[in-house]
Image (tube, grey):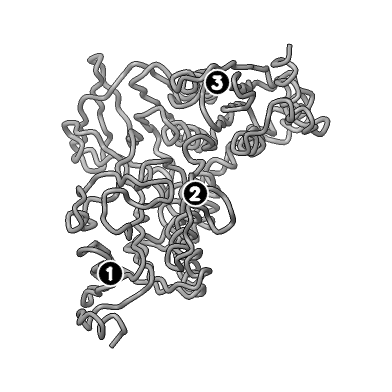
Amino acid sequence: MSTEQQQTGADPAEEWFDVVVVGAGPVGENVADRVRAGGLTVAVVEQELVGGECSYWACMPSKALLRPVQAVADVRRVRGAREAVTGRLDTAEVVARRNAVVGDWDDSGAAGWLTGIGAELVRGHGRLAGPRRVVVSPSDGGPERRLAARHAVAMATGSDPVLPPLPGMAEARPWTSRDATSAKAAPARLAVVGGGVVGVEMATAWQALGSSVTLLVRGGGLLPNMEPFAGELVADGLREAGVDVRFGVSATRLARPAADGPVTLTLDDGSTLEADEVLFATGRKPRTGDLGLDTVGLTPGAWLDTDDTLRVTDVEDGWLYAVGDVNHRALLTHQGKYQARIAGSVIVARARDEWQDTLPWGAHAATADVHAVPQVVFTDPEATAVGLSTEQAERAGMRVRAVDYDMGSVAGAYLYADEYKGRARMVVDLDRGRLVGATFVGPGTAELLHAATIAIAGEVPIDRLWHAVPAYPTISEVWLRLLEAYRG
């Protein structure tokens, strides 16, 4: 019998840990790793694959599908090299490489790492059963396990795709992001609904892999959270690749009379579109519908509000944390992992009674996921951004100046590709002389983004950036051109 059972008369069937983490994706793994490094015991509950959405159905497989597309596109932009590319992508080989990247959906390696750090992996569906309690229904159908946490429970359950309630949706059996990243072959005709990141990336991938893709966008542009020019350049790239991009149109009804037949989409302009598969990339919702939130006074199916230490604000005694997508702060794997490192360190500090509103490594508790969030859209061209767009900064009440530069005019870009097309923008807070946003669109721009992230997160004065000298001839020289344009 444990000390807790002796002192409180608690249920002897309960298994006690310092921390219980629900969800073993990259976010949950990072929480577990950080609390174990701090000397706490931890149980991690997972009902699917250890490694989560990112490893098997999102980041890794999608980028595995997109990398060959970008590699061939880059070669075809260079005279003397393009002559070596004589055919189409080998779809079967791309898919086989994608399968290898995700380990053929075998999580034994990830599970071995988790147990190797000293965490206990509990396979099954976990749900809260009151304060500091998690009940797990095992995946193998065995008896349920009852876990109890001395210090904290961390919810890292992620999010699910949203399907709009259209007539015929169930019959149509549409793709979600999971289907799009795990498909074994390219459908002859693919309709993609949604102009966000998933929509444009999957349109890019499957068009190059042999599908005839139609992209349906309700609004007037792509990537609405970025600078408008980002969506415009990505739309140009999609059209050049052969994608039929249609703006200002929505699906109102779906029909798939035969199980193995095509899908017919009725559009709001009265026309119809026939496709072999249809992907809905129309948003995400929190995976909190069956987590027992009602047992601690929270609303099932809702996003979980947190403070800057990732502690859920509406739960007494501060034992519940929500990390990653589930808190709706920034639905990006790298931001969720960043939050997990903070949450894990905070949990350890509070367990040791060492918490003084600062993290153990000396940084202030407030996270940067509200003002320096980097994102890369792996289309052709790549679209990358960090911080605030011009509109977002102005809406926040800042007095800002946006400075643009044609990236094709940089020597490094000229060498990178013939007729390089791209654009850069930095957004400067004029009152503070600090960079608050940056956007780069063009081939190979993803690797530019971290420099901008450091400048924004570190609040580097614009005058100081003059002393960060870019190597010549690289695309990074665009920084110098932007500073010159800013100074005039």
Q: Residue under circle 3?
A: 233
Q: How many marks?
A: 3
Q: Crowding near pointer 3: few (<14 within 10 Å), some, many (20+)? A: many
Three-letter code for the amino acid on which mark 2 is drawn: Ala
Q: CA distance from mark 2 to mark 1?
A: 37 Å
**Residue at the farthest top position:** 488
What numbered label is drawn on residue 365?
A: 2
Q: Residue under circle 1?
A: 139
Callout 1 secondary element: loop
Left or right: where does residue 146 sit relative to residue 38?
left
Q: Earlier in the sequence, mark 3 or mark 2?
A: 3
Residues at badges 3 and 1 in contact (C-beta under 8 Å)? no
Left or right: where does residue 101 sit relative to residue 176?
right
Indicate which label's residue lies in the foreground, 2 or 1: 2
Q: Residue at x 26, y 49 (%)?
A: 314
What numbered label is drawn on residue 277?
A: none
Residues at badges 2 and 1 in contact (C-beta under 8 Å)? no
Indicate which label's residue lies in the foreground, 3 or 2: 2
